[in-house]
Amino acid sequence: MEKKKITIVGAGNVGATTAQWGAKKEIGHIILVDMIEGMPAGKALDLMQTGSVEDFDVNLIGTNDYKDTKDSDLIVITAGLARKPGMSRDDLQDANYKIVREVTEKIMEYSKNPIIMVVTNPLDVMCYVALKISGLKPEKVFGMAGILDTSRMRAFISMELGISKRDVFALVLGGHGDSMVPLPSYTTVGGINISKFLPKDKIDAIVDRTRKGGGEIVALLKTGSAYYAPAASVIQMADAILNDRKRVLPCSAWLTGQYGINETYVGVPIILGKGGVEKIIELDLTKEELAALQKSASEVKAQMSKLQI
Ligand code: TXD
């Protein structure tokens, strides 16, 4: 099968680490783009040489020129500012809006009908920017957040129980921010509901730590935000798309009435394949869970409406 072409815009922490996971997994030809002169080319060269030691063969180039992104199958947008300590995701909105707008315009000059996966924060709002500016169909523009938030919840449960992370499944819906909605009712260990393993107060503490999971890492790092788990999550989605795996994953998708939510990006379970968002799955939620999801979506919508697009 011919290798697909994946462009990663932003060769910073998340972008470069995404290229690293992607190269190791031979996910496709990788183009790493950044505005800083020479930097993406240097990182790509370094990474390409790693293939001799780590046994991978992919075409990997780094560039400042969008011409090199021509006919990409998948574009991952990580360009933008990362949160600094004390800075909320919302503080980022104005700065990153301009960046995501510019990047989307440039991408669309060279790729006719790509899939765009947004990573830049504030995530759900930036998906909307990419949707509007690209003019692509909503199923082709979506965001990575739910897999990361879920990975944090899974890890905290695994740490608490001393049970393999592989056997822990969790689900986090909603906007990628403080209003996210972790769902203990859909959280299982080896297929068994989490309530059989942990008392309510422990589950509540894990839910709370999950909500603040990004901030916990920002506070420790002092400069920048998390990137290993974010990059791994991007590659899980890229693999689902480029290999048409039809995986069921929580992602930020454009809702058109599902969950009583209309014309907003918010995290929900979807089926992800070569067409992008191939289906949005509507779960049965309790009244409280649904209300929390709708509240989270309305917060995203309020932020979206501040943009002049
Ligand atoms: O769950 C999620 N969606 C997230 C989101 C998880 C982790 C990080 N998340 C967000 O991704 C974060 O809040 C930021 O908004 C982005 C990128 O985070 P990263 O940690 O990679 O930031 P860096 O290391 O600062 O890298 C950003 C790069 C840097 O090299 C800039 O030069 C580049 O983006 N950049 C640009 N490239 C091209 N074009 C333009 N205009 C541009 N502006 C900045």
Image (cartoon, grey):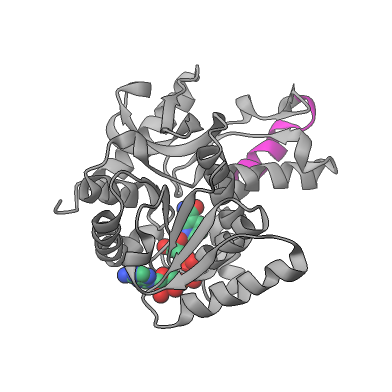
Locate residue 234, reporting x and y percent: 54, 50
In the rendered image, the quadrant that contains the N terminus is: top right
Magenta residues, as a range?
196-208
- Quick one: which residue is furthest to the top in this view? 284
| Relative side of 65 to 144, left or right | left
Q: Along the line of sight, which residue is nearer the eye, 279 or 63?
A: 63
- Residue visible at 37% across and 65% down in the picture: 68
Residue found at the very far left of the displayed protein: 308
Question: Is residue 216 on the magenta stretch?
Answer: no
- Observer able to see residue 302: yes
Nearest the eye: 257 or 287: 257
Query: Can residue 85 be seen here?
Result: no
**Magenta stretch containing residue 206, yes or no?**
yes
Residue 158 coordinates in the image, percent (x, y): 77, 43
Total number of numbered discs in the rendering: 0
- 67 to 193, vertically: above or below: below
Residue 113 x %, y %: 31, 43
